Image (tube, rainbow, N blue to C red):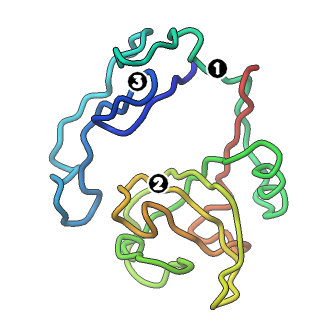
Amino acid sequence: YGIVSGGDYGSNEGCRPYEIPPCEHHVNGTRPSCEGIDSETPKCVRKCQNKKYDVPYKQDLSLGEKAYRVSSNENAIMKEIYTHGPVEAGFTAYEDLLHYKSGVYSHVAGAPLSGHAVRVLGWGVDTKSKEKYWLVANSWNTDWGEKGMFRILKGSDECGIESRITAGIPKL
């Protein structure tokens, strides 16, 4: 198993552009709600769907060598990102995350919504609040948060994000 290149829904980027139309995740917006959409997972077809893409499927395909858990220690997570690139994180999403606009997020109020998976890209320190944060890519469209991204408090396992980190090594 592996993954091929692709782009946003409706684009002509890569081997297999995203096939499911965008929808609104937990908020009212211009797109239909994700809750009412009956989107089936696209079938695994081992060929490029984008007719304008000229790289053969097998040449475009990236395979994984192994996947593994990363220690919940923030230095171990930072080392993993620095050495191998972004990691996947599972955490508990709460109602107040839906209303996030900017800044360093930490859960204040609201019930848990569900478990949620995101990509942790890096880390930093907020220039105003001086809070340490993880830089995270979310899947709730680019008009949510900081252009589809958010910063979450680092070093305190906020919402369980540091205790559920998974990484992988590609097969080269």
Which residue does the numbered mark 1 point to in the structure image?
Answer: 63
Which of the pair 32/13 is nearer the observer? 13
The circle drawn on residue 116 is: 2
The residue under label 2 is which amino acid type?
A: His
The residue under label 1 is which amino acid type?
A: Leu
Mark with earlier residue (3, 1): 3
Q: Position of residue 159 (x, y in %)?
A: 56, 68
Mark 1 vs mark 2: give the one in front: 1
Mark with earlier residue (2, 3): 3
Which residue does the numbered mark 3 point to in the structure image?
Answer: 16
Mark 2 vs mark 3: give the one in front: 3
Find numbered disc 2 in the image and state the secondary structure of the residue it sits on.
strand
Q: Residue at x 84, y 54 (%)?
A: 79
Dot 1: few (<14), some (14–19), or many (≥20) neighbours within 10 Å?
Answer: some
The residue under label 3 is which amino acid type?
A: Arg
Q: Is residue 164 above or below residue 125?
A: above
Q: Is residue 129 above or below residue 117?
A: below
Which of the 4 image quadrants contains residue 60?
top right
